[in-house]
Image (tube, rainbow, N blue to C red):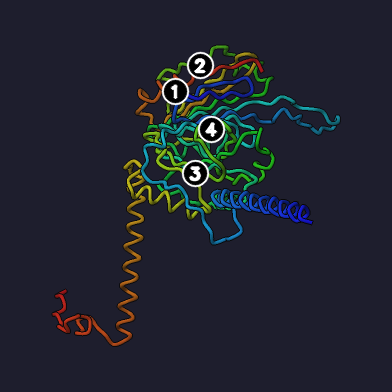
Amino acid sequence: MTVLVVVEAVVVALLALLVASLLRSHAEILRALHELGVGTDPSARPAPQSLGTSSARGTGADVQGTTPGGEAVAVGVVGAPQSTLLAFLSSGCITCHRFWEAFADPRLDVPGGARLVIVTMGDESESRSRIAEIAPVGQTVIMSSRAWEDYDVPGSPYFAYVDGSTGTIVGGGTATDWANVREMIEQAADDGALRDGSEHRAARARRARARHLAQDAREARADDALRAAGIEPGDPSLYASGRSEEPPVR
Amino acid sequence: MTAISASGISANVPAGWDGRISVRGGGAATALHAEAGEFVMDVRAYTVVHLANFALPEARGDFGSGAVELMGPNDVFIVLFEYEPSAVETALFASHAIPWPLPLTAFDPSRLKRAIRGQAGAQSFFQTAGRAFCLYVVLGSSTRRAALVPPVNQVLGTVTIAPG
């Protein structure tokens, strides 16, 4: 009887160990999936790597490969007259489909006046016919495993923003949607990570103007609300001390 | 410098430049329907090479429509367009001399396929390796020929054509 109890205890202990190791393995898989932007919680967004200033990211490289249609292609990235946003996508990744769809929008506007180039793996890892099927019309799509190696791409989706004049990779990382990528690039531009070219100055001016207009709109809404409440400019209630000021001479 | 190659044509694309080698027809037979019956017109693919020091748009014609309109004064656009094999028998392609390096005098606004103010073009028809080609080059600025033609010739110097 004692032997039976001991054997049973050992079996239970072994089973408990097995369950614990399975749970740990499961948690590691979930964590890895979360980092890649795949998960069941739609509100959960992985923290993308910043596209901020970073000289440590190194220098970019021109992209060479083939188009889904079979053309031999080389795209100038380093020394190009404009910056380039390289979007490393695949046909199979679920998150990538949001980008394939977003890039099909003819109104797509890449911040900083950058050129968008979509890069997939080559024939050894991708279906050419599938890529040809989902490739957005009018966008440059290149199949090149070499480019994935050159930019040290850990997985898809992945983005690299290369300054054309210096060839510097000013930022890289993953994201869950196009708005996320835009935000990161604009932040990098505001941080001065991109060269101070005219297109970037123009982009900054556009954003500044938009912010200014938004502020004007807020002030107009506030004025309307105050007037509706019977409070006109110069009303004593507008001043903490209760003192009324002379309205400015116009 | 990046090398691209397809259909027996290769070129070295300088850093920052775009290059494309497209094969038209893909070798597919073209059936011609005539009163005498159906017969095959031409089974050979032909090639179009585009080289440019600016971002080539995806939607562009063989001779650069859709691209030349985007060119700035410092931009250059090179087309090497292959014609059907039988063209080597015609007078237009009688020259066996590779047309590059191009002299400055080869460029003129009147040689543009589509006249765009300020631009200049050059056209040469020739045959090599049993294949008939038109070389067409557009400069973004006619007045900047002295600065723009040398890089064009430098790139053309790397182009090699093998028998088709």
- Indicate left or right for A178 with A128 as reference: left
Secondary structure at badge 2 equals: loop
Secondary structure at badge 4 equals: helix
Amino acid type, callout 2: Pro
Q: How far is the residue under mark 3 from the one under mark 4?
A: 13 Å
Most foreground residue, B105 or A114:
A114
Position of residue A93 measured from the top left corner of the image (x, y, whole percent)? 62, 47
Most foreground residue, A182 or A217:
A182
Residue at which label 1 appears: B152
Amino acid type, callout 4: Glu
Q: Are marks 3 and 1 in contact (CB under 8 Å)?
A: no
Amino acid type, callout 1: Val
Above-or-below relation of B73 to A92 = above
Ranked by sequence position, the earlier of labels 2 and 1 is 2
Q: Residues within 10 Å of mark 2 (few under 14, many from 20)?
A: some
Q: Which mark is residue A27?
A: none
Q: Which mark is residue A159?
A: 3
Marks 2 & 3 on one chain = no
Most foreground residue, B64 or A31:
A31
Residue at which label 2 appears: B99
Q: How far is the residue under mark 1 from the one under mark 4?
A: 31 Å
Q: How far is the residue under mark 2 from the one under mark 1?
A: 12 Å
Q: Are marks 2 and 3 in contact (CB under 8 Å)?
A: no
Secondary structure at badge 1 equals: helix
Q: How far is the residue under mark 4 from the one under mark 2?
A: 38 Å
Image quarter of the C terminus of chain B: top right
- Indicate left or right for B127 with A248 as reference: right
Q: Which mark is residue A149?
A: 4
